[in-house]
Image: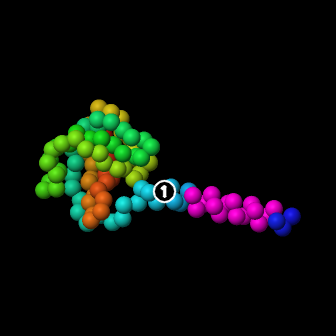
Amino acid sequence: MKRRSFVTAALAAVCIGCAKKGESRFDYGEAKKKYELKGVVVNLKPEDRVVVVKHEKIGDWMEAMTMEFPVPSAEEFGKLKPGATIRATVNVNDMFFWLTGITVE
């Protein structure tokens, strides 16, 4: 009986570790700069929570173009559909950029 409890506890710990590890891939750290984005959703990549956006110029950071943006929040990613016009905040640090504060117009 003790062995079964140990095995159950060990499996539970492994499962919890896997769940945390999976979500950690959407943690991009703290933003050093933030910019307003206006654009149109071109495509979605749900497996990576990435949205392809044809966007206007983004402040002094990026010229107008079509590019991929990670969206860490599953809830915010769920708002997106191809063809939707969006506004969002582009968060930038030394290693990553990502979208938050997404509104669909």
- Residue drawn at x 75%, y 62% is 7
- Residue drawn at x 57%, y 58% is 18
Q: Amino acid at mark 1?
A: Glu
- Whether residue 75 can be seen here: no
Residue named by callout 1: 23
- Left or right, residue 79 beside residue 15: left
When the figure is inspected, residue 93 is found, relative to residue 45, above or below; the finding is: below
Residue 10, magenta (yes or no): yes
Residue 69, magenta (yes or no): no
- Relative depth, front residue between 6 and 58: 6
- Assign a secondary structure to mark 1: helix
Residue 9 rendering spot, x and y as whole percentages: 72, 64
Q: Magenta segment, which residues? A: 4-18
Q: Main secondary structure of the magenta part?
A: helix
- Left or right, residue 14 beside residue 52: right
Pick the quarter of the image with the C terminus. top left
When the figure is inspected, residue 85 is found, relative to residue 18, above or below; the finding is: above
Number of marks drawn:
1
Residue 11 rendering spot, x and y as whole percentages: 69, 60
Quarter occupied by residue 53:
top left
Q: Residues within 10 Å of mark 1 (few under 14, many from 20)?
A: few
- Whether residue 44 can be seen here: yes
- Left or right, residue 90 beside residue 17: left
- Residue drawn at x 36%, y 45% is 50
When the figure is inspected, residue 77 is found, relative to residue 81, above or below; the finding is: below
Residue 75 rendering spot, x and y as whole percentages: 43, 47
Residue 1 rendering spot, x and y as whole percentages: 86, 64
